[in-house]
Amino acid sequence: SNAQSFSEFVFTTGGLPPSGGKLIVDNTTGIGFSTVFRFEMVGWGSEDVPLSYQFSYKRDLSDPYEQPTFMNTAYSLRSFLDTVLPQGSAAADLGVKVTGHVVSVMGVQATSNSIEVFVRPNDNPDLDTNTLDEIRYLDPESSLLYAIMLAQVQEPSNITNDLINESLQIVEAKAFNETLI
């Protein structure tokens, strides 16, 4: 039998990951919920532009399995982020590790270097109340981040369900454009 066959495969590749850049920060020490840090991804390049960016942090540097907290819920074309941070974990000498993430228009991702910043506790006795008040005036994404940060710094023995519930009610109202009381 003289049977012949032919097949063709076409592969679309996503290109190479973004490269050549790094994460920088304007200040490596601060006070929780008070100091505004500017994190910036600089020098990143790719054949597949535009690039988009995302930022995350980890509070417990002694826990290799800690999941990062993302400071922006989706990638953004902005290569920088101005934000406050929660205090670092006492187990990590108050260090908070921040990492940048970059993705090309083709969806190929890269992760930056990590920067450790030292964030002391805020000794303001009204921190919880002030933060709840501030959450009311933030955009929905930022209000959610602040609520998460507020929950992360509470001592398990002192945490009040009222505080967490109120912050989440504010976030929910903002997300659904409800009137805040």
Image (cartoon, grey):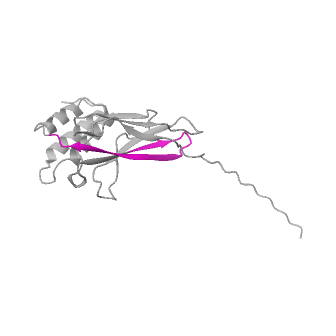
Instruction: Considering the whole magenta stretch, tell me its main secondary structure.
Output: strand
Where's the C terminus, which quadrant? Answer: top left
Where is residue 42 shown, x and y percent of the image?
A: 46, 36
Where is residue 41 shown, x and y percent of the image?
A: 43, 37
Identify which residue, 15 or 29, lies in the foreground: 29
In the picture provided, is 103 more to the left or to the right than 124?
right
| Image height of 157 relative to 84, above or below | below
Where is residue 98 shown, x and y percent of the image?
A: 35, 45
Q: Quadrant of residue 8?
A: bottom right
Identify which residue, 58 or 12, lies in the foreground: 58
Q: Is residue 175 magenta?
A: no
Outermost residue toward the right?
2
Identify which residue, 90 or 163, lies in the foreground: 90
| Image height of 164 relative to 26, above or below | below
In the picture provided, is 56 more to the left or to the right than 164?
right
Where is residue 20 shown, x and y percent of the image?
A: 52, 42
Tell me the magenta residue range. 99-122
